[in-house]
Image: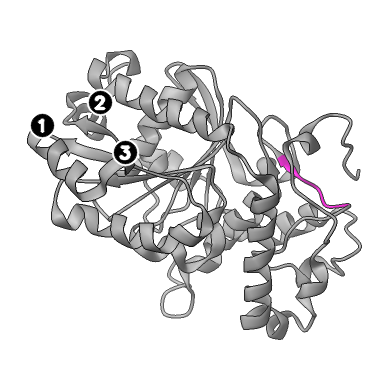
Amino acid sequence: MKIAFVGKGGSGKTTLSSLFIRHLAANEAHVVAVDADINQHLGAALGLDENEAAALPAMGAQLPLIKDYLRGTNPRIASAATMIKTTPPGEGSRLLRVREDNPVYDACARTVRLDDGEIRLMATGPFTETDLGVACYHSKVGAVELCLNHLVDGQDEYVVVDMTAGSDSFASGMFTRFDMTFLVAEPTRKGVSVYRQYKDYARDFGVALKVVGNKVQGEDDLDFLRCEVGDDLLVGIGQSDWVRTMEKGRPAPFELLEADNRMALQALQNAAEDSYELRDWERYTRQMVHFHLKNAESWGNEKTGADLAAQVDPAFVLHEHLSEPSAAQPA
């Protein structure tokens, strides 16, 4: 399943996504984690030290390699240079799978060993001095969107993306790439303001959205969240001594996370698993094409000098069965 964590800056979005990733690893799920936030903190939240986190390769810097690999032998794509962040796959494209080795993972992913297993971690990369004043962060996130467009995943396979904060997540069509979106909200008026924006934006696209209340201190906080978000509230997560210790750089074994918070993480996994039964690959592909055509008309055709609408393969539907061994990919 493809899972997004969104929320207001400071809501605890990265902390919650890292706890969920640890929980999945402890439950023996296969996980690819992606740090797509402008503030690159997911690696540290997963236990990497400062040097290890800084050494993570930037996906944005590997965009030419990513495009060249994913293009495969797709006859509708004249060259890797004509691919943009929204280019959809078609016949002949190479697809990414959670449980495989490929040049994209070799260049962009690193294995992180956790208490109860290991995961692959990828990161868009931080802003650099050369980016300041001349680049948009969404140009870096484009590498993530392109990979998600070409990724097929099955049950017990998770791609967990820590998205950029606030409504910036809607600056691209990537918000429609997920089976479940967890919006992390504190029990305050500011904490639920991003929820209202997200709910309004996502309504027309069938985005599955659940609210995770964070820093919940009692029933009054839960009552507030229920009043503000209604049935979208999935669970509340309380203050955590385990998290406080982890943030000081002295993490205890994950099995010592408070029982109530472990149960809350299981509720997230249950919701994610429920979303698996509701997958609509035709809608997923249709939305992918929708945003590609919008980007092509808005800026892509002019930038590449090509008619990017011609990249759409009308007979192609991305689907889980394409991850089966019988669905051979180009060499």
Which of the two labelled residues, at mark 3 and mark 1, occupies the earlier sequence position? Answer: 3
User: Image check: 221 left or right of 297?
Assistant: left
Taking depth in this image into account, of 121 and 307 the one nearest to the observer is: 307
Which range is magenta?
Answer: 92-96
| Secondary element at tag 1 | helix
User: Label 3 is placed on what type of residue?
Assistant: Thr
Residue 322 lies in what quarter of the image? top right
Q: Quadrant of the C terminus?
A: top right
User: Image check: 316 left or right of 298?
Assistant: right
Q: Main secondary structure of the magenta part?
A: loop
Q: Is residue 149 visible?
A: no
User: Label 2 is placed on what type of residue?
Assistant: Arg
| Mark 1, residue position | 219
Taking depth in this image into account, of 72 and 212 the one nearest to the observer is: 212
Q: CA distance from mark 1 to mark 2?
A: 30 Å
Give the class, few, some or many, for how many residues have Cα within 10 Å of label 3's Cα (few <14, many ≥20): many
Q: Quadrant of the N terminus?
A: top right
Give the class, few, some or many, for how many residues have Cα within 10 Å of label 2's Cα (few <14, many ≥20): few
Q: Which dot, 1 or 2, sits closer to the camera?
A: 1
User: Label 1 is placed on what type of residue?
Assistant: Glu
Q: Which mark is residue 250?
A: 2
Q: Is residue 72 visible?
A: yes
Q: Is residue 93 magenta?
A: yes
Q: Position of residue 144 (x, y in %)?
A: 58, 54
Taking depth in this image into account, of 301 and 192 the one nearest to the observer is: 192
Residue 280 lies in what quarter of the image? top right
Residue 152 lies in what quarter of the image? top right
Who's the residue at 40% across and 35% down the image?
48
Q: Which mark is residue 15?
A: 3
